Image: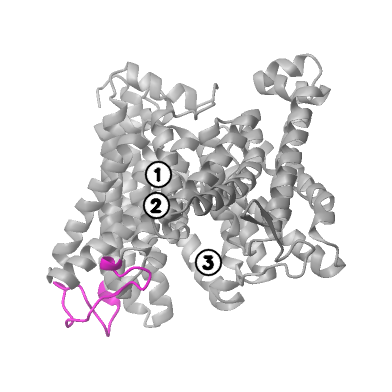
Amino acid sequence: MTAETLAQVVVSGLLTGMIYALIAAGLSLIFGLMDVVNFAHGEFLMTAMYATFVLYITLSIDPLFLLPMVAVFLFAIGVVVYRVLIVRALSVKVNSGMVQIFATFGLGIFLRGIAQFVFSPDFKSLRGTMLSDKTVSVLGVFMPLPQLAASLVCVVAFIGLWLLTTKTHFGRALEATREDSEAVALIGVDRHFIFAMGWGIGAATVGVAGVMLSTFYYISPGVGVTFALIAYVVVALGGFGSLPGALVAGLAIGLVEALTTLLIPPSLKQVGVFGLYLLVLFVRPRGLFGNL
Amino acid sequence: MPASLPAGLDLGERRRRRQALSGLVVLAILLVLPLGIGDVYVRNILILTLMYTALSQAWNILGGYCGQISLGHALYFGIGAYVSTLLFTKFGVPPMLGMVAAGFVAALIALVVSWPCFRLSGHYYAIATIVIAEIVYLLFLNWDWVGGALGINVPFRGESWVSFQFRTAKLPYYYAFLGLAAVLWLASYWIENSKWGFYWRAVKDNPIAAQSLGVRLFRSKMVAAAASAFFTGIGGSFYAQFVAYIDPDSMMNAQLSILICLPAVLGGIGTLWGPAVGAAVLIPLTEVTRSYIGGSGSGTDLILYGVLIMAVATLKPEGLTGLFRIDGRIKPAAAPATGPSGSTHAA
């Protein structure tokens, strides 16, 4: 193996890792905010990809310009899901642990079923976009343009999320609600509003990831499952609720996945990632950066 | 149980007698039911319903009574299917013996898997079970000795109970799955009033209180995991003989893990009749939807599952057995209000 191959593998691993990080960011945000794991997170991603597909086919607008539209659409889905499903799941008194898992789990299956019903199980892909089939070469390392663009969008999205959660009034309300949702109610913060916003922002984030992913990855009803599993891995590694943690862990996972393909057949590449996840989970059940 | 609460005990005794009676009545009906139904399609639905009843009852031991939500039980099902099939095709061991081995191997793997996993709780445990099942699925998909993605055809060696193969009549499979479901029903019935049953429900409802009263959390969970996997593995080897072809996609995929816990979730988690009621509603509904609204590719079955799970989880978290007022006769698992959990549960 030459240094060039290694550089190539490292770069493509990091590019993939950026997408993993952004997908995981939304999951981490929601989990950190209210200690609920969204088992339908992969299906949010899948929904965003199909939304991009439909809008691209019907309006012929390039996916890059569809970003705001799909993000708003996913934001709305997130808010509705919180208001309709999650509120009810949280208020249940019997079997509360199982209800929280199965409510979002059921939602995921439902969304997958809808996608299969409307679009059939066949794989779809976006052809002829601005970014399609273009490659950039830097110092002899090739980077496919869609992946490179996705990484840049992810960086921007992460900066935006970081500013939103640390520099704004809303971010402080979010942080306060996370710390003690009962107490903030006493000082006039509507925690249901904050929670709904959290779900909206979490879904919008994965929406952005979905748009960028659809420029270079096939779309199918089951596409979310694989990415959701990786997102859990990233969140668990990075620590639940930690944005910088999600970023670092996402990049690490992308890198590990790319490097394992050098050692074992590509069809087994996820075994390495999942194995790493289990290892970390058993050593540090709250993740590398988790302080919860 | 100690006679500290004689009134409760009396109620419990009457409830258990009614449960035993209802079990006998249902068994009697199920024993004669297929004799009146010659239709292959309907018989097939009956067989699948009994299979999912059994599998979900097995899942219910760990997920329901002990409260450890496993979303990776397809792993034990698949292991069971592969162990008996490999023993049969590679070593000539008759499946009747092989299925016992299948149960023990599945239980052993459950112990190995659970050793680290039981350090995790709630969501973390559930996600770990998915990930582990996915790892094994990927390994089997790429492991040539076990047939890889192509799978294994189970060769036909003549109709007999020893090789557990029947080509012309599917009726023996019906009775085999009925037997398995009945054994698991009996096991659940026994569990509900046994030391382990009380341990498990205490672990589920309030692990800290249970521990302070001397329940060994880790050991209790391990026993539940092993028992649950043992029966799931046997179910897997039954199914392998029934369909005579196994591959990772049909024996180990994530969808199957959902199907295994779904009947219990719908019928009532941690209840005696929950898995049976859930399977009796879900499986015929699924099969009929598939045949009349379109193949399984159309996604209608997924939409149906999704809506059912969401509805039951949020509107009827104690399960359909509560909805049908069966709970008048058969109380959910919380019924023995003698444990330390009784007070918290009544809230």
The amino acid type found where label 1 is placed reads Gly
Is residue B330 visible from the viewing direction of this image?
no
* Letter of the chain that mark 3 sits on in the rendering: B
Instruction: Identify the element where label 2 is drawn.
Output: helix
x, y percentage for residue B122? 47, 34
Both on one chain, marks 2 and 3?
yes
* Letter of the chain that mark 2 sits on in the rendering: B
Both on one chain, marks 1 and 2?
no
Is mark 2 in CB contact (under 8 Å) with mark 3?
no
Is mark 1 in CB contact (under 8 Å) with mark 2?
yes
Is B101 in the magenta? no
Q: CA distance from mark 1 to mark 2?
A: 8 Å
Q: CA distance from mark 2 to mark 3?
A: 31 Å
Chain part drawn in magenta: B144-172
Residue drawn at 33 percent across, 16 percent down = B212
Which residue is disc 3 drawn over? B285
Q: CA distance from mark 1 to mark 3?
A: 38 Å
- Give the quadrant of the N terminus of chain A: bottom left
- Per the rendering, the mark at residue B135 is 2
Is B161 in the magenta? yes
Both on one chain, marks 1 and 3?
no
